[in-house]
Image: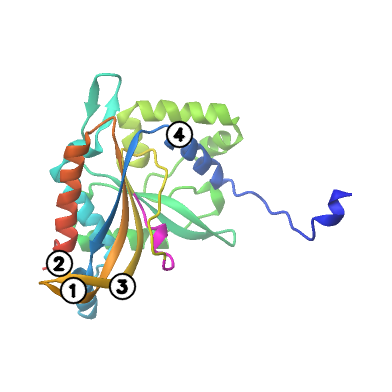
Amino acid sequence: MYKKNIGEYRIEEFPISRTATIDIGVAGLKKHHIKALIELDVTEARKVIREKKKLSEKISFNSWLIKCISHAVEEFKPIHGIRKGKRKVVIFDDIDISIAIEREVDGKKVPLPYVIRKTNEKSISDINQEIKSGQKQSIQGEDDYILGQEKKNKFVMKIYYCLPGFVRRLIWKCIMKSPSLTKQNMGTVMITSVGMIGKINGWVIPVSIHPLCFAIGSIVKKPGIVKDNIEIREYLYMTVLVDHDIIDGAPAARALSKLTKLIEGGYGLT
């Protein structure tokens, strides 16, 4: 009786890559993240980037933003620390940032993770070129679930996807308890730019297992005050998640204040 009233529908295959996403979401909900929702004036920075592109300089807004975040973290390294046991925190010198690169897999667009290693040692153009290389990297079905040089063993990944949910989540729990495994597999900082797709006047609130996560939202035009004058400015919405188990609110606020100065001051563009 009920089937007559549900209308037409179709059944599609559930993407196997979503399995890991679900597991990460479950693990991320257990993290004690402080959430900061901020607006950043990127008007001047975007002007400079547009001018540099006209001169054929190989940079992009995203690569510049990654560099700004990397530099801020480099100055406040405890913010990307990873807890080891009950009484220790491992603070890495290298800043490895995880991003998502959307690729077409079997006719469907799938966001695949890519870890940019040692962003603190790379220039904006280096980061931009690495992202472009990741976008061009050959992939063969969903077994290539991660981009970059550190390919995962396909056989191991197939076994992982076949495991019961509680076993997969136990694996993630073990990874998150090991700072070295965490950094090796996913870096210490995550940046998601899903909010830049389209125009959303608001903030994206992500779930993450990283000690530090940035969700980049839309850039919108609205009035702002510059030297006591009202002008139309471009503002970037950004959400930041900081692991409260690792760092207190005051030092986290100082780190975000530094990041704000870097971004609004056009760090590295002049």
Say whether marks 4 and 3 touch (CB < 8 Å): no
Distance in Å between CA atoms under marks 4 and 3: 36 Å
Distance in Å between CA atoms under marks 1 and 4: 40 Å
The numbered mark at residue 48 is: 1
Distance in Å between CA atoms under marks 1 and 2: 7 Å
**Residue 240, image x, y percentages:** 30, 48
Say whether marks 1 and 2 touch (CB < 8 Å): yes
The numbered mark at residue 221 is: 3
Q: Is residue 178 visible?
A: yes
Q: Which residue is drawn at 24% across and 67% down?
A: 59
Distance in Å between CA atoms under marks 4 and 2: 38 Å
Q: Please tell me which of labels 4 and 3 falls first in the chain.
A: 4
Compared across the picture, whether 240 is left or right of 109 comes to: left
Judging depth in this view, the residue of 74 and 44 nearest the camera is 44
Distance in Å between CA atoms under marks 3 and 2: 22 Å
**Residue 15, image x, y percentages:** 60, 49
Tell me the mark number nearer the camera, choosing from 3 and 2: 3
Compared across the picture, whether 101 is left or right of 123 comes to: right
Say whether marks 4 and 2 touch (CB < 8 Å): no
Tell me the mark number nearer the camera, choosing from 1 and 3: 3
Q: Please tell me which of labels 1 and 4 falls first in the chain.
A: 4
Disc 2 designates what residue? 269
| Neighbour tally class for label 1: few under 14, some 14-19, many 20 plus, Cα within 10 Å | some
User: Going by the picture, which residue comes out furthest to the right?
Assistant: 1
Disc 4 designates what residue? 27
Say whether marks 1 and 4 touch (CB < 8 Å): no
Distance in Å between CA atoms under marks 1 and 3: 17 Å
Q: Please tell me which of labels 3 and 2 falls first in the chain.
A: 3
